[in-house]
Image: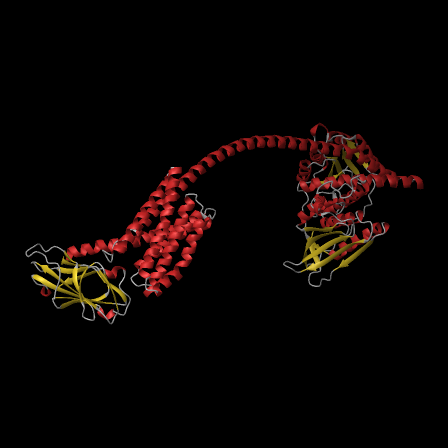
Amino acid sequence: MAFGAAAAWGAAPGPQAVDAAIRVSVDGQADVVRLPDRVAAAPAAPVTYRLRASLAPPLRDLALYLPGLVAHARIAVNGHVVDDRLADAAQPLPRSVRRLRVIPLPSEFVQTGHNDIEIVAAGPGTVSVSAVWVGDEEALRQMHERRLLGVVIGPAFVATVMACLALCVLLLWVRHGRDPLYGYFGVGALGWALHTGWTLLPAPLLTGAHYSIWWHVLYSGFVAMLVVFCLRFAQRRWPRFDRTLWLAVLAAPPLLYAADAFGVLFDAAAYWRLALIAAVAVAVWAVVADAWRRRNADSVLLASTGAVSLAFAARDWLTARAFTDNNPVYLTPYSGALFIVLVAWILIDRYVRTARELEQVNAHLEQRVAAKSAELRVALDDMRAARDRALAADEAKSRFLAAASHDLRQPIQALDLYLGTLRGEALAVPQRLLVQRMGAALAALGAMLDALLDISRMDAGLVRPQPRPVDLFELLHRLADEFAAPAAAKGLRLAVHAGVARATPYARTDAALLERVVRNLLDNALKYTERGGVLLSWRLRSGGAPHWLVEVRDTGCGIARAEQARVFDEFYQVANVQRDRQRGLGLGLSIVRRLCAILGAPLQLRSVTGRGTCLSLRVPATDEPPVAASAAADDDLPAGLVVAVVEDDAQVRDALGALLAQWACVVLGAAHAGGVLAQWRALGRPPVSAIVADYRLVDGDTGDQAIAVLRAEFGTATPAVLLTGDTAPPQLAALHASGFDWWSKPVAAPTLRTWLGVVVRRRAGEIGVGAPAGAVASTVTAGVAP
C-alpha cells in the first residue's frame, strides 16, 4: 500500500515536497497522516512511514531532503536502503544540524513515475518526521543551507556576539558597579546566549524530561533579568511584580517536574512560556510609556527592541503550538541582535557624551591651569624679587659682619699685644692678677671671634683633613684629663670607657680636627648638665669596615624631638633664651657638624627630654701605628733679631713693636712696604729675620703684595706671616691661595714668639729646610691655615 503526492508526468524535475504518508505502528495499525508528524515511540517499537513520489526524466543527481528528522531512521527508496541509522535508536534523538538530512539517490535506485519511500523511525521518547523533499541534489542542498543558516548558524552567531557583549557589560558593571542596569542586562544577556547555545548543541547536556524542564528554567531566568532591566530603564519600581517574577523563576523546577509526573509537561511548558511572554509584554508597555514621556533615542530604541522581541516571542509560541514545521526557524534568538544594537548604541552614546563632558572639563581645567600658571608666574617673579632682596641683604650682612669683625679684631689684637708686654714686666701681685683677669676676658672674646672664623673657614673650603694614624686612646684620655677639673667644679662625674682592641688599636683620621670635635662635644655636654655626669666612650665595631664608635653621653636636660634638627644651626641654643654668655654663642654643634662632614665621620644624635643626650661619630680604624711627633723647638729668641712689621693700624703696629722690642728685637714698622724699606736702608740694610704683615693695608694694597716687595730686597727666603681680621669666605680663600702662613687676629704673644723661634732655627739649619711651611705653622697654633 502506498500513498503520496504525485507530480505530473513529464513535468520538470524540480524539488517537490511529499507531506502525505501512511504511518504504520508496531502493532500493524495504519493511519494516513500529514507530515510533519510527531508520535510517542520507543527504541524497540519503531514507526514506519510510507510515501510515494513521482519523478520524471532525467533521473540523475537526485536526492532526498528532510528538514526535520527528529528520529533515528532507516530510509529506503524502491526497496533500496539509502541511509540507515536505526542502530542508534537507544541514543538521544538528533539535535541541531543532525536534524537536517540531505541523502543522495543513486540513479539505479529510482525510476520514472512512482517511487516508494519508506522511513522506519525510532528513538527514546517522542519522534518526529518532517515532510520529504525529492529532486535535484544541488537545489536541495541550497534549501538545506538556507534552513541550516536560519535554524543553527544564525542563532549561534547572534548568541556568540551577545555573550561577548554581555561579558563586556558585566566587566563594566564590576569595575563601575554604581549602575545596576549594567548588571541586570549583563546577566540576562549572558543567560540568553547560554540558553541559545544549549539549544543548538548537537549533543544534549540532559536527557528526557530533565532537558525540557531545565531548558525552561534557564529561559525563565534570563527573561526575568531582561524584564527587570526594562523596568529599571523605564524608571519603574513595582516591588510586588518583581517579587512575583523572582518567585516564578524559583517555582519553575518543582512545577514543571510535577507536570511531568502528571503527563502534561508539554502543555505546561507551553503555557509557562506564554506567562513569561505576558511578563515581557508588561515590560514593553513600561518602556513604550517611558519612550513617549522622554522621547530620547535610548528609550525609543529600547521600546522598539522590546516590541519586536515580544512579537517574535508570540510568533514563535504560535508556530510551536501549530506544529506546521517540526524544525522551524525561530525568530526569538534573532531579537537578541536588536539588543546588541541597543546596548552598543547606549554605550557609544554614553561614551560620546562622556568624551564631550571630558573635553569641556579639560577645556575648563586648561583655563584654570592657565590662570594658575599666570598667578604662579607672578608669584615666582615676586619670589625671585624677594630672593634677590634677601641675597642682597645677606651680602650686605656678610659685608657688615666682615667689616665689623675686622674692625673689632684690630683693637683686640692691640690689647692682646699690650697684655703680652705687661706680662713680661715685673709687676706686683695685684697688678699681675689684674692682667691675668684682663687676659681671660680677652681670651673669651677672642674665642667667640675664632668660632665665627672657624665657620667661615669651613664654608670657604679652607679646612682640609690630613688623615694619619692616630693613637685614639692617648688623644681621648688626654681630653678626659683636661675636662676632669671643669666637671668636678660643677659637681659632675666625668667617666671614661675605652673598648678593647687587639687587631686594629689605632684610628685613621685628622687628629687636630677630631680633637676639636670631641672637645666641643665635651664642652657642650658639661654646659647643659647640672647633675649626674658625662661619659666619654670609644668602642671598636666590625660591621662592614672596622671603625671606632666615639660617644659623648650626658644626663642633662635633653633635647625635644622638634628641636633636634635645629641644635646644629648657628646661634641656636636649647634653654638659653636669655643668651647666657657662659654658655657660648651656640656655635659648638654647628662647628661639630661641619667638621664631621669634612672628616667623613657620620654624626648621630639621640636624646630624651629630661634624661640626657648621646652624640656619636664613627672614625675609621687601622692597625698602622702613628708616627712619633718631633720635639717642640725651644722658643728662646736670640737678641738683635730684625723683624719687619707692615701694619696700617697704628695701635696694633705700636703694640706689636713694643712686644718685639721687649723680646730684644729690632723693629722696622710702617703702614706700607715703602716705609719699612726706608727704615731698613736708614739702618744700613741689616739682615731681616722675619716679616709680619697685615693682609688688608691702605690704598687697597694687600699683605702678600707687601711681602713680595720686601722679599725682593731682603731675600726670597725671608720667613713671612700674614695677619688678618677678615672673616668673609672670599678673603679667607684669597689668603689660602697666597701660599703664605697666616693667622687670624687676635694672635697671642706666645704664638708669635714660638713662630719666630721656629723660623729663625729653620733658617739656621736647626729644622730641615725641606719641611713645608704649613708643617712649621701647624706646630705653633691651630689658627694657622692648613
Quadrant for the C terminus, please: top right
In percent of width and height, residue 101 lies at 21, 61
**x then y, percent, for residue 124:** 28, 68
Residue 718 in sight in this render: no
Q: Nearer the viewer, residue 285 or 492?
A: 285
Residue 236 drawn at (x, y percent): 43, 44
Q: Residue 357, relative to residue 227: is it above or below?
A: above
Horizontal side of residue 79 vs 601, given as left or right:
left
Is residue 676 positioned above or below 774 on the image? above
Q: Position of residue 578 (x, y in %)?
A: 80, 39
* Location of residue 620 (image quadrant): bottom right
Number of marks present in the image shown: 0
- Determine the residue located farthest toward the left in the rendered image: 10
Camera-side residue: 111 or 740? 111
Query: Which quadrant does the N terminus fall into?
Result: bottom left
- Kindly identify the residue that appears in the image at 69 percent across and 63 percent down: 503
Front residue of this view, candidates 122 and 605? 122
Colouring scheme, one of rainbow, by chain, secondary structure, one colour: secondary structure
Q: Quadrant of residue 3?
A: bottom left
465 left or right of 260 in image:
right
Q: Is residue 372 visible?
A: yes
* Residue situated in front as seen by the camera: 226 or 324: 324
